[in-house]
Amino acid sequence: MNNRNKTIYITTPIYYVNDKPHIGHAYTTIVADVLARYYRNKLGDDNVYFLTGTDEHGAKIAESAAKVGIDPQKFTDQISDEFKEAWQNLEISNDQFIRTTSEKHIKIVTDILNKLKEAKTPLGNDVLYESEYEGLYCVGCEKFLNPSDLVDEKCPDHNQKPKLVKEKNWFFRLNDFLPLIKEKITKDELLIYPSTRKNEVLGLIDKQDLPDFSISRSIKSVPWGIDLPWDKNQKSYVWVDALSNYITALDYPQGDLFQKFWPANIQLLALDILKFHTLYWPAILLALGMELPKQLAIHGFFTINGQKMSKTIGNVIHPNEVVEKYGAEVSKYLILSQFSFGSESDIKVEDFPIKYNADLVNGLGNLINRTTKMVEDYLDGEIDKSGLEIIEDVVSKINQDIEKINFKEALVKIWKLIQESNFLIDQEKPWELSKSNNKDDQEKLKSVLGFCIKNLYNVAYSLNFLMPQKSQEILDIIQADKIKKPAKPLFPRL
């Protein structure tokens, strides 16, 4: 059983491989990465598990593969590798990268499907039932749409008319589970963050017009997928296949990882898959007799410089482009510091160089250079190391922000320490104090520079969750026997 005080399991959604990774995928993955790094520092490496991966089945994959003239497996191999490369370049610290085309995943999903076939709902009905369905299906969304969802009879996300589909499928009896799911969400046993999304989910349930969802599609409609074990003319539809990755990765039901880390502590996702994670996923778990995740954390939609990401517009940004310019750690800082988690967000790439220079070059970088240079010149590189201690009230508030996924707010508190130091230096003018023979002035010099070094220690300590390498470089500089200005700036000008 997962002991919340001792283990942390963090997941991203698995990313659909019909196209290459972009900065929206990177944002969710970076959030998971910094949480994992923070909790590893707090609980130890062995007590944190961080999962990401790729979703590789469905009609859209088969279509995308056909367009480039290769079979779906080869296509998914190529795109999945691009996600892996992007996360490696961003120095993402995931413990596992799961693929839904892996033999292990397919085997466990087949077992899950069989269990659902035998399971009963809280009202004693069969969880799964066969029925004929007719509806408007968008291949781009991989889902059925209501007429009210359309704009000018087209899917608003893909600007294409959905197909009228009529076929016999297997369905999951969702409505029998909704009262229990509502109870758990209301009591925060399944915590949905932020609270605005919690209210949105409860509103969906209260509408009482949610249809049961399909767990299979005809092999003619979806040729690329996991076989339904009791009907070879049907393929497992996306939700049981994709959502189950969070437990197949842990070797459900008997694996050591599953026993240690389930239920998940933080499952991160974007707003467009809110319904599937907050209603379908809990219903599947309840049908399997399992505990629900502790928290589902949902971030809003992204735009790029005020426009929706679009290949047509040409504003889709690959994470590698940012890393090539700024490096992995600075890229994470620039992406996370722009907005608060959960809000509708506009990534202003044009502001990246401005923010890099203001915050890191002129802010933190300049403070490191000027402080260490003055300690080296005026105090022979020596400072009272007993002053290098944690400022408990500040660091504890920063940690609280990190645990609440309020990274922007945590960074504001960290940068306040930098601003305090730069302000004190400008006010007290250590270069003038150093020229005085007055004993009080010499003590003030030591006090001012000691205060700045202590603040740098706390900045480095607190930034470890986001910039571990830069943090260690700062600590190495200020904890050396003799402090010297670094030979090269930690944040060089572009």
Image (cartoon, rainbow, N blue to C red):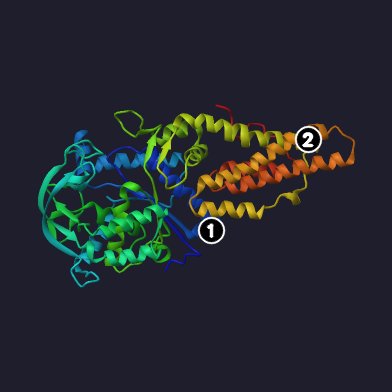
Q: Amino acid at mark 2?
A: Pro
SS at circle 2:
helix
The spot of residue 430 in percent (x, y) is: 78, 35
Label 1 sits on residue: 44
Which of 464/177 is in front? 177
Asked whether residue 480 is in view, the answer is no
Q: Amino acid at mark 1?
A: Gly
Of pointers 1 and 2, the one earlier in the residue sequence: 1
103 to 70, vertically: above or below = below
Which of 112/214 is in front? 214
User: Viewed as shown, does residue 344 lie left or right of 478?
Assistant: left
Of labels 1 and 2, the one closer to you: 2
Mark 1, Cα crowd under 10 Å, few <14 / some 14-19 / many 20+, is few
On-image quarter of the N terminus: bottom left
User: Viewed as shown, does residue 395 lie left or right of 217?
Assistant: right
Asked whether residue 14 is in view, the answer is yes
SS at circle 1:
loop
Label 2 sits on residue: 430
